[in-house]
Image (tube, helix red, strand yellow):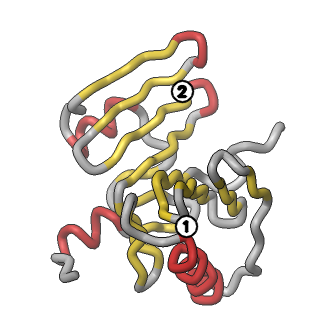
Amino acid sequence: MRIEDKEIRQIEFRLNYGIGSIEFNMTEDEVVRVLGNPIEKEIREEEEMVFMHYADLSIYLHPDDNFLTVHPHKLLLGENLLIMDVTTEEDAINYINEYHLLQNIPIHVDYELDLDKMLFFSNLGLTIWLEDSVVNDISIEPINSNEEE
């Protein structure tokens, strides 16, 4: 599958920074300036979160904690491409292991939940969900965003 340079720049994972031109510390207004208005926007006051849905990704803003999480449909990890509903569990784990080696950080799965299956890698800020051994959701966030202060 050939991916254009412009698309690569928009889906490239940048450790503890963001994806493409989206930074983890952006506000809602800054996201709109970069991506335009979302297809759908949802405000959940009880969770104090704003959900912005675009064609190829969703952004969940955590305004009280000053960070956002990104749920891309595609994520470039080094030379490998994770694609929702396409990438198998085995390939995803191989890609993540290769990325750990490329970044010279230890390979570590923090926890695994069977939701069908969820794998969380805190040293990448990466969570993948699997259904029937295929990636069905990808989430990236800044490292340590889940830790209590």
Residue 123 or 66: which is nearer the viewer? 123
Name the image quarter holding the C terminus: top right
Whichever of callouts 1 and 2 sits on the residue coming sooner in the sequence is 1
Name the image quarter holding the N terminus: bottom left
Number of residues whose C-alpha sits closer than 10 Å to that of mark 2, classed few (under 14), some (14–19) or many (20 or more): some
Q: Secondary structure at mark 2?
A: helix
- The percent coordinates of residue 66 (x first, y second) are 57, 34
Residue 112 or 105: which is nearer the viewer? 112
- The percent coordinates of residue 84 (x first, y second) are 39, 59
Residue at the image point whose x is 33% and y is 37% from the top:
30
Residue at the image point whose x is 43% and y is 16% from the top:
43
- The percent coordinates of residue 63 (x first, y second) are 54, 26
Q: Is residue 55 above or below residue 66?
A: below
Residue at the image point whose x is 49% and y is 55% from the top:
138
Q: Residue furthest front?
A: 132
- The percent coordinates of residue 44 (x first, y second) are 49, 15
Question: Residue beneath label 2, please?
Answer: 63
Q: Amino acid at mark 1?
A: Leu
Q: Is residue 26 above or below residue 64?
A: below
Question: Residue beneath label 1, please?
Answer: 15
Q: Is residue 104 above or below residue 4?
A: below
Q: Secondary structure at mark 1?
A: loop
Quadrant in the rendering for residue 29: top left
